[in-house]
Image (cartoon, rainbow, N blue to C red):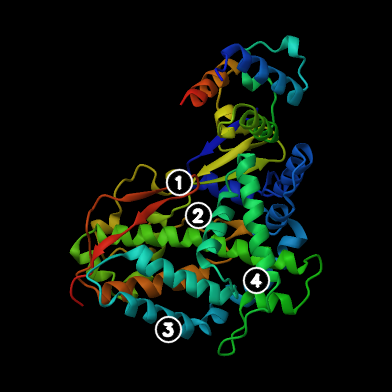
Amino acid sequence: MKIDYNYIIDFLSKKISSHSNTPLASLSSDVSMENIGLSSLDVVIISGEIEDEFDVEIEPSVIFESKTINDVAHKLLKLINE
Amino acid sequence: MKRVHIIEEIDLAKEVFTSTDVISEGASMESYINEVQLKCNIDLSNLSCVVRNFPFFMEGNRHTIIRQKVLKHIGTNAKLASWEPIIDKSLNEALDNIKSKKQIDLLADFVNPFLQKTTCTLLGILTKDPIKFEKCTNLAEELLNPLLPIRTLKKMDSAFTEFLEEVLSKEPAKEIDGNIPLLTALLKEPIEGFSRKDITALVLVIYAGTIALRHTLANIIFRILTSTKTIKQAAARSEWVHANLDYLIRESVAVKKVSRLSKEPFTLGSLNIKKNDKLIIDLQAVHHGTSGQCPLHKNINLKNENLKDNSHLAFGRGSHFCLGVNYSKIIFEKIIPVLFKEYPNLALQSDLPDLFEHSQMLSVKTLHCHLGDY
């Protein structure tokens, strides 16, 4: 299955919104991850959800070290296509 | 996201280790695992048990009690002295096993089997599958990594479940020449707040802690092997190893980083730390700074007491100071001179280090050597 970049952004935004209690509407893909307020636990759980959804292995540190949702999506797309 | 501060100076690192009033030592790890269980609807109960009994993550009275018990049984030099004949016997057997060989991997063929056997005997760990047990304890070491993926947490829980079930189904190890192994001793005297499973998990974690010892020892041997002939000759003398041991440890410490979490705002040197900031002590930077090459290369008469500041944080500091510090030093002081005395022409096949890739450790993975004549 070909994974669409927009689908990844949509998926990540929904998950991040849900875990950080941030309204989805206010969560643009270029907002700084530092300002979203995810805890280590949130990041670990989101990485697990990503693994289940896209059948890839992603280290939580990849999300932790990303600057924006776009940044996470690019890294994830690269992992999917490897 | 949390703010992260990397600590690279030894004085600041010491302050982080000892400022327990403002810095959490990690007691939240158990609740963290429990939250993962709850939120992801998965069973990590045995991992949670291991974390609860991981001395590094323990705080308060529970930590004090278990620390005193462990030190009483295997922590003091006086107690370890009665184990020395058993350690010596095991070391001689390990030497016999490599005598007929010309080329070996010093770690896989000598150091690791010796340490595995000796440590299991001391701790009272009986397992039918030592290789699987090693893998299980390697996973325990990974717990120091604060951002483990859920798949790794599941894998850990599964490995710990198997080990805990195996050990709990067996009779504790018997005493040897009047020495009672740690697990046997702790199971004999019920400790309030600790079940048999808690005690077993604790001993598993203590074993896992000795893997750091192995990595540091590997680095020390590598340093000596890649040093001058004079240093190699000096390493064959027990008194030289004793005099320089802390320096060798400081230069060779394998643990990369130690993480802590601030409980409230405070000032650390020029840093303004906020509540919940993460502090990462970079042990490699703390110990090596910009000094570069080990001064032992230049001056073999250098002694611990001659060095301006020979302190190191290889064993931590404060209330979580390593429980195995005396055991580690006894092992180092036995194995290094014996090895270099027995094999004065011991030489690496290549000076290039074969590095072990691990998130928490920096060490050599193999030491392929020519034994030379003995």
- In the picture, the disc for residue B89 is 3
Point out residue B132 in the picture as x, y percentages from the top left corner.
Answer: 54, 61
Q: Which residue is mark 1?
A: B286
Residue B193 or B271: which is nearer the viewer?
B193
What amino acid is labelled 1 in the image? Val
Q: CA distance from mark 4 to mark 2?
A: 21 Å
Label 1 or label 3, whichever lies nearer to me, is 3
Q: Residue at x 55, y 27 (%)?
A: A65
Residue B282 or A68: which is nearer the viewer?
A68
Residue B332 or B129: which is nearer the viewer?
B129
* Disc 2 crowd, CA 10 A, few/some/many (<14, 14-19, 20+): many
Determine whether B361 is above or below A60 in the image.
below
Left or right, B283 with reference to B191: left
Of labels 1 and 3, earlier in sequence is 3
Q: Marks 1 and 4: CB-CB under 8 Å?
A: no
- In the picture, the disc for residue B70 is 4
Marks 1 & 3 on one chain: yes
Marks 4 & 3 on one chain: yes
Q: CA distance from mark 4 to mark 3?
A: 24 Å
Q: Marks 4 and 2: CB-CB under 8 Å?
A: no
Marks 4 & 2 on one chain: yes
